[in-house]
Image (cartoon, coloured by chain):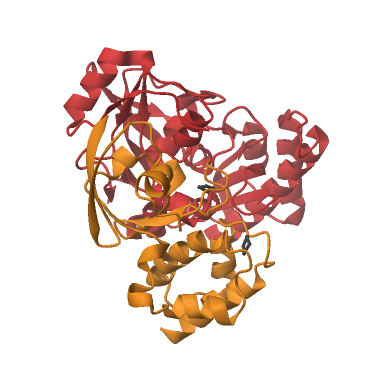
């Protein structure tokens, strides 16, 4: 067991974890933050994507012990005080989610992506979404929502 | 699907890391970006006794141009590498190859050195390094050695790296005037493993090809230079017919095996087509 200290959405946590615990399981099971989803557990579906020290990563391809000393953002950290972000509002307006399983990962990847590509082309957004499987929407509304959010910034 | 137990080590210096590798040898596995290794741990295809996390070793993520090369520290993340100014200016082949690797979030984390050391015959960076005639620097308690990319990749997931060695940097030959390159890949979906991939590097002098390197991956057990294609191009000016012939030469030279997604015949055809396209584009880039 290894002691770690991690800040998640501005709140500091001190926990003791087994070395083999995946960060995705740490977030969901240890911290109870179940907004981060787990689909494939091998890097393909994208729904476990979170932001670690400012960069989006797959939390299923990362060990909790590796995140010692880091700052994480998960989907719970987006709507501070219950107010949706522009990106979240765009998702609602465009019907960019149905069951919502893929949504947390896409939102967190899109936050990082739009930070680095403030005026993305449609093609770039489609490229981003190649890393996120959605079984409900057919992707088009998600593309539109991300482009809308980019336009609003 | 969870990793089997292991001991986790997080060395803070290169000496400490090399000491751990010397001590544990085959029992240890190096954790860099983890984008290939962590799935292997979760599926328990890999069950190392000791995991050596090198992510906090200082000074191993630099990317800089020097003496006709771009030097990339082993921990340079793939996304940073593809967009780094020295790479954009001098190693356009790498900039073309990087977007084909996995996805946005996996490129953020995946490292250049990790991809090279993993030696997957379907990976983009090993193919680009071979096509450019680059090399890797391997360090151990016994010292350092530079290994040419051609000698580094042995077969599927097997490199010349000894169990006590850490790949510390890769050297990417810089392109100057008269050089042109192109990377071509086909996968069923963006980010999936490629069915075929090729990289072509040409040097033109007086409107003729002076140097041609054509390399292919995915259909071979390691990234492989196709000398037949290079010889056919040397001394010539490229047109559509010559590019097609180079593609045919490459298709004849490879010996793919049937897979779930594509027959051997299809992979051979695809390799020819990708080489043809890459040769044409590299020629245009070099002019
Ligand atoms: S659960 Fe992490 S990518 Fe699918
Ligand atoms: S909204 Fe159901 S998987 Fe995307």
Total numbered labels placed on residues in the image: 0
Residue A110 point in image, percent of width and height? 46, 67
Left or right position of B9 against B83: left
The answer to which of B270 and A26 lies nearer the viewer is: A26
Residue A21 point in image, percent of width and height? 38, 36
Height in image: B231 above or below B179? above
Residue A40 point in image, percent of width and height? 57, 44
Quarter of the rendered structure image containing ligand 2? bottom right
Residue B169 point in image, percent of width and height? 32, 37
Height in image: B139 above or below B115? above
Left or right position of A137 against B167: right
The answer to which of B235 and B260 lies nearer the viewer is: B260
User: Is residue B280 in sight in this rendering?
Assistant: yes
Q: Residue at x 25, y 62 (%)?
A: A10
The answer to which of A16 and B186 lies nearer the viewer is: A16
Q: Residue at x 57, y 25 (%)?
A: B156
Residue B90 lies in quadrant:
bottom left
Q: Residue at x 38, y 76 (%)?
A: A82
Chain shown red: that is B
The answer to which of B31 and B242 lies nearer the viewer is: B31
Chain shown orange: that is A
Left or right position of B29 against A14: right
User: Is residue B134 in sight in this rendering?
Assistant: no
Q: Quadrant of the C terminus of chain B?
A: bottom right
């Amino acid at each position: 067991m290894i002691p770690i200290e991690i800040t998640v959405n501005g709140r500091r946590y001190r926990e003791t974890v087994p070395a083999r615990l995946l960060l995705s399981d740490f977030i969901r099971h240890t911290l109870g933050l179940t907004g981060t989803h787990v689909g494939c557990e091998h890097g393909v579906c994208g729904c476990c994507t979170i932001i670690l020290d400012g960069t989006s990563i797959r939390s299923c391809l990362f060990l909790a012990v590796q995140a010692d000393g880091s700052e994480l953002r998960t989907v719970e950290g987006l709507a501070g005080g219950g107010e949706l972000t522009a990106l979240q509002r765009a998702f609602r307006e465009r019907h960019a989610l149905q069951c919502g399983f893929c949504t947390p990962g896409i939102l967190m990847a899109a936050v990082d992506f739009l930070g680095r590509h403030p005026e993305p082309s449609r093609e770039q957004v489609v490229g981003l979404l190649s890393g996120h499987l959605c079984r409900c929407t057919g992707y088009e509304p998600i593309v539109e929502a991300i482009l809308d959010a980019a336009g609003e910034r | 699907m969870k990793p089997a137990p292991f001991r986790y080590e997080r060395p803070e210096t290169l000496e400490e890391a090399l000491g751990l590798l010397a001590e544990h040898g085959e029992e240890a596995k190096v954790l860099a970006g983890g984008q290939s290794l962590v799935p292997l741990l979760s599926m328990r295809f890999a069950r190392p006794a000791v995991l050596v996390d090198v992510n906090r070793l200082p000074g191993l993520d630099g990317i800089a141009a020097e003496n006709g090369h771009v030097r990339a520290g082993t921990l340079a993340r793939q996304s940073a590498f593809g967009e780094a100014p020295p790479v954009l200016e001098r190693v356009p082949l790498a900039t073309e190859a990087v977007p084909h690797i996995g996805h946005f979030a996996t490129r953020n984390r995946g490292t250049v050195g990790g991809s090279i050391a993993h030696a997957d015959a379907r990976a983009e960076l090993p193919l680009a390094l071979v096509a450019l005639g680059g090399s890797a620097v391997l360090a151990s308690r016994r010292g350092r050695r530079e290994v040419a990319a051609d000698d580094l990749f042995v077969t599927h997931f097997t490199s010349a790296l000894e169990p006590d060695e850490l790949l510390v940097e890769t050297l990417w030959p810089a392109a100057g005037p008269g050089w042109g390159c192109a990377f071509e890949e086909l996968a069923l979906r963006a980010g999936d493993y490629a069915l075929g991939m090729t990289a072509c590097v040409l040097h033109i002098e007086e409107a003729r090809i002076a140097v041609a390197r054509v390399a292919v991956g995915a259909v071979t057990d390691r990234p492989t230079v196709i000398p037949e294609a290079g010889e056919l191009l040397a001394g010539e000016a490229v047109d559509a017919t010559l590019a097609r012939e180079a593609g045919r030469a490459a298709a004849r030279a490879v010996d793919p095996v049937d897979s779930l997604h594509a027959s051997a015949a299809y992979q051979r055809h695809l390799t020819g087509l990708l080489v043809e396209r890459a040769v044409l584009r590299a020629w245009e880039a070099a002019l």
